[in-house]
Image (cartoon, helix red, strand yellow):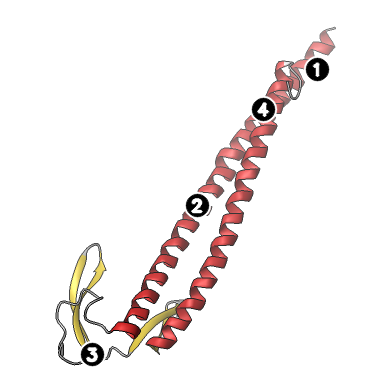
Amino acid sequence: MAMEEDEGDMEAALVDSKIAEYESFVERVLKADHQRCLDEIREATAILEECRTLRSNIRFLIKEGLCEHFSVSYCLSPVQEDISELETNVELGCQFYVKAFVPNTSCIFVDVGLNFRLEMPLADAEAFLKDKEQHLLNGLELKSKRVARVKADIHEALHLIDLMTSVQSGRGPGS
Protein backbone atom coordinates (compact mmCIF):
# COMPACT_ATOMS: atom_id res chain seq x y z
CA MET A 1 0.00 0.00 0.00
CA ALA A 2 2.81 2.41 0.89
CA MET A 3 4.56 1.53 -2.34
CA GLU A 4 1.47 2.50 -4.37
CA GLU A 5 1.28 5.86 -2.54
CA ASP A 6 4.98 6.49 -3.28
CA GLU A 7 4.41 5.71 -6.96
CA GLY A 8 1.35 7.99 -6.97
CA ASP A 9 3.35 10.80 -5.38
CA MET A 10 6.15 10.29 -7.89
CA GLU A 11 3.67 10.37 -10.79
CA ALA A 12 2.04 13.53 -9.39
CA ALA A 13 5.45 15.15 -9.03
CA LEU A 14 6.33 14.12 -12.59
CA VAL A 15 3.09 15.57 -13.92
CA ASP A 16 3.68 18.77 -11.92
CA SER A 17 7.16 19.11 -13.37
CA LYS A 18 5.88 18.49 -16.91
CA ILE A 19 3.12 21.08 -16.44
CA ALA A 20 5.70 23.60 -15.23
CA GLU A 21 7.97 22.70 -18.15
CA TYR A 22 5.18 23.21 -20.70
CA GLU A 23 4.10 26.49 -19.07
CA SER A 24 7.68 27.71 -19.13
CA PHE A 25 8.02 26.69 -22.79
CA VAL A 26 4.84 28.57 -23.71
CA GLU A 27 6.04 31.71 -21.91
CA ARG A 28 9.71 31.69 -22.90
CA VAL A 29 9.59 30.32 -26.43
CA LEU A 30 6.15 30.38 -28.03
CA LYS A 31 4.91 33.75 -26.78
CA ALA A 32 8.27 35.37 -27.53
CA ASP A 33 8.19 33.86 -31.03
CA HIS A 34 4.63 35.11 -31.49
CA GLN A 35 5.63 38.64 -30.44
CA ARG A 36 8.65 38.59 -32.77
CA CYS A 37 6.45 37.49 -35.68
CA LEU A 38 3.97 40.28 -34.97
CA ASP A 39 6.80 42.82 -34.85
CA GLU A 40 8.08 41.56 -38.21
CA ILE A 41 4.59 41.96 -39.70
CA ARG A 42 4.32 45.53 -38.36
CA GLU A 43 7.73 46.40 -39.81
CA ALA A 44 6.93 44.84 -43.20
CA THR A 45 3.55 46.60 -43.28
CA ALA A 46 5.22 49.96 -42.63
CA ILE A 47 7.69 49.34 -45.48
CA LEU A 48 4.83 48.30 -47.78
CA GLU A 49 2.92 51.47 -46.91
CA GLU A 50 5.99 53.62 -47.67
CA CYS A 51 6.41 51.81 -50.98
CA ARG A 52 2.76 52.38 -51.90
CA THR A 53 2.96 56.06 -50.95
CA LEU A 54 6.10 56.58 -53.02
CA ARG A 55 4.57 54.77 -55.98
CA SER A 56 1.43 56.87 -55.71
CA ASN A 57 3.49 60.06 -55.60
CA ILE A 58 5.54 58.98 -58.61
CA ARG A 59 2.37 58.12 -60.52
CA PHE A 60 1.03 61.55 -59.68
CA LEU A 61 4.28 63.20 -60.79
CA ILE A 62 4.16 61.41 -64.11
CA LYS A 63 0.49 62.21 -64.65
CA GLU A 64 -0.01 65.70 -63.22
CA GLY A 65 3.28 67.43 -62.60
CA LEU A 66 5.12 68.22 -59.41
CA CYS A 67 4.21 71.40 -57.54
CA GLU A 68 0.74 70.59 -56.21
CA HIS A 69 1.39 67.19 -54.61
CA PHE A 70 4.65 67.22 -52.70
CA SER A 71 3.90 70.03 -50.23
CA VAL A 72 6.56 71.92 -52.10
CA SER A 73 7.39 75.13 -50.31
CA TYR A 74 8.66 76.87 -53.43
CA CYS A 75 8.97 75.86 -57.07
CA LEU A 76 11.78 77.59 -58.86
CA SER A 77 9.94 77.80 -62.15
CA PRO A 78 6.22 77.74 -61.38
CA VAL A 79 5.18 79.12 -64.74
CA GLN A 80 6.70 76.27 -66.71
CA GLU A 81 4.52 73.35 -67.69
CA ASP A 82 7.38 70.87 -67.19
CA ILE A 83 9.04 71.51 -63.85
CA SER A 84 12.64 70.41 -63.85
CA GLU A 85 13.78 71.57 -60.40
CA LEU A 86 12.27 72.52 -57.06
CA GLU A 87 12.87 73.41 -53.44
CA THR A 88 11.09 71.51 -50.70
CA ASN A 89 11.29 70.49 -47.06
CA VAL A 90 12.50 66.98 -46.27
CA GLU A 91 12.01 65.22 -42.93
CA LEU A 92 15.24 63.71 -41.60
CA GLY A 93 13.44 61.97 -38.74
CA CYS A 94 11.84 62.86 -35.40
CA GLN A 95 9.94 65.76 -37.00
CA PHE A 96 13.21 67.47 -37.99
CA TYR A 97 12.98 69.14 -41.41
CA VAL A 98 15.60 70.68 -43.69
CA LYS A 99 15.31 72.56 -46.95
CA ALA A 100 16.29 70.54 -49.99
CA PHE A 101 16.96 71.58 -53.54
CA VAL A 102 16.11 69.04 -56.22
CA PRO A 103 17.97 70.00 -59.41
CA ASN A 104 16.44 67.31 -61.62
CA THR A 105 12.94 65.96 -61.09
CA SER A 106 13.03 63.50 -63.98
CA CYS A 107 14.90 60.83 -61.97
CA ILE A 108 14.65 59.46 -58.46
CA PHE A 109 16.94 57.37 -56.25
CA VAL A 110 15.22 54.19 -55.10
CA ASP A 111 16.45 51.85 -52.37
CA VAL A 112 16.71 48.52 -54.21
CA GLY A 113 17.79 46.51 -51.17
CA LEU A 114 20.80 46.05 -48.92
CA ASN A 115 20.85 49.84 -48.60
CA PHE A 116 21.83 50.31 -52.26
CA ARG A 117 20.14 53.16 -54.09
CA LEU A 118 19.72 53.24 -57.82
CA GLU A 119 18.89 56.30 -59.89
CA MET A 120 15.91 55.62 -62.14
CA PRO A 121 13.60 57.58 -64.40
CA LEU A 122 10.19 58.03 -62.79
CA ALA A 123 8.48 55.47 -65.04
CA ASP A 124 11.11 52.81 -64.27
CA ALA A 125 10.88 53.60 -60.56
CA GLU A 126 7.10 53.14 -60.65
CA ALA A 127 7.47 49.75 -62.37
CA PHE A 128 10.16 48.68 -59.89
CA LEU A 129 8.01 49.72 -56.94
CA LYS A 130 5.06 47.76 -58.33
CA ASP A 131 7.22 44.62 -58.35
CA LYS A 132 8.59 45.45 -54.90
CA GLU A 133 5.03 45.81 -53.56
CA GLN A 134 4.18 42.34 -54.82
CA HIS A 135 7.34 40.93 -53.23
CA LEU A 136 6.46 42.61 -49.92
CA LEU A 137 2.89 41.28 -50.09
CA ASN A 138 4.21 37.75 -50.63
CA GLY A 139 6.50 38.18 -47.62
CA LEU A 140 3.59 39.44 -45.50
CA GLU A 141 1.56 36.39 -46.47
CA LEU A 142 4.37 34.09 -45.32
CA LYS A 143 4.72 36.04 -42.07
CA SER A 144 0.97 35.78 -41.47
CA LYS A 145 1.11 32.02 -41.96
CA ARG A 146 3.99 31.86 -39.47
CA VAL A 147 1.90 33.78 -36.90
CA ALA A 148 -0.99 31.35 -37.41
CA ARG A 149 1.36 28.38 -36.88
CA VAL A 150 2.76 29.86 -33.68
CA LYS A 151 -0.75 30.62 -32.40
CA ALA A 152 -1.76 27.04 -33.13
CA ASP A 153 1.33 25.78 -31.26
CA ILE A 154 0.42 27.94 -28.26
CA HIS A 155 -3.15 26.66 -28.34
CA GLU A 156 -1.96 23.05 -28.55
CA ALA A 157 0.49 23.49 -25.66
CA LEU A 158 -2.20 25.09 -23.50
CA HIS A 159 -4.54 22.22 -24.36
CA LEU A 160 -1.88 19.70 -23.28
CA ILE A 161 -1.39 21.58 -20.02
CA ASP A 162 -5.15 21.50 -19.46
CA LEU A 163 -5.24 17.74 -20.14
CA MET A 164 -2.37 17.09 -17.73
CA THR A 165 -4.05 19.20 -15.06
CA SER A 166 -7.33 17.29 -15.50
CA VAL A 167 -5.58 13.93 -15.30
CA GLN A 168 -3.70 15.06 -12.22
CA SER A 169 -6.88 16.18 -10.47
CA GLY A 170 -8.48 12.83 -11.24
CA ARG A 171 -11.13 14.13 -13.62
CA GLY A 172 -9.62 12.39 -16.62
CA PRO A 173 -9.03 13.87 -20.05
CA GLY A 174 -11.92 15.70 -21.65
CA SER A 175 -13.96 16.00 -18.44
Q: For marks 4 and 1, give the CA distance.
A: 22 Å
Earlier residue among tags 4 and 3 = 3
Foreground mark, 4 or 3, reads 3
The answer to whether one can see residue 59 in this image is: yes
Q: For marks 2 and 1, give the CA distance.
A: 44 Å
Foreground mark, 3 or 1, reads 3
- How far across and down, in percent of the image, does residue 71 sit? 21, 73
Query: Which disc is residue 83 wearing?
Result: 3
Mark 3 Cα shell of 10 Å, populated few (<14), some (14-19), many (≥20): some
Query: Which disc is residue 7 wearing?
Result: 1
The answer to whether mark 3 and mark 1 are in CB contact below 8 A is no
Mark 2 Cα shell of 10 Å, populated few (<14), some (14-19), many (≥20): some
Query: Which disc is residue 162 wearing?
Result: 4
Q: For marks 2 and 3, give the CA distance.
A: 43 Å
Query: Which disc is residue 38 wearing?
Result: 2
Q: Secondary structure at mark 3?
A: loop
Vertical comparison of 57 with 33: above or below: below
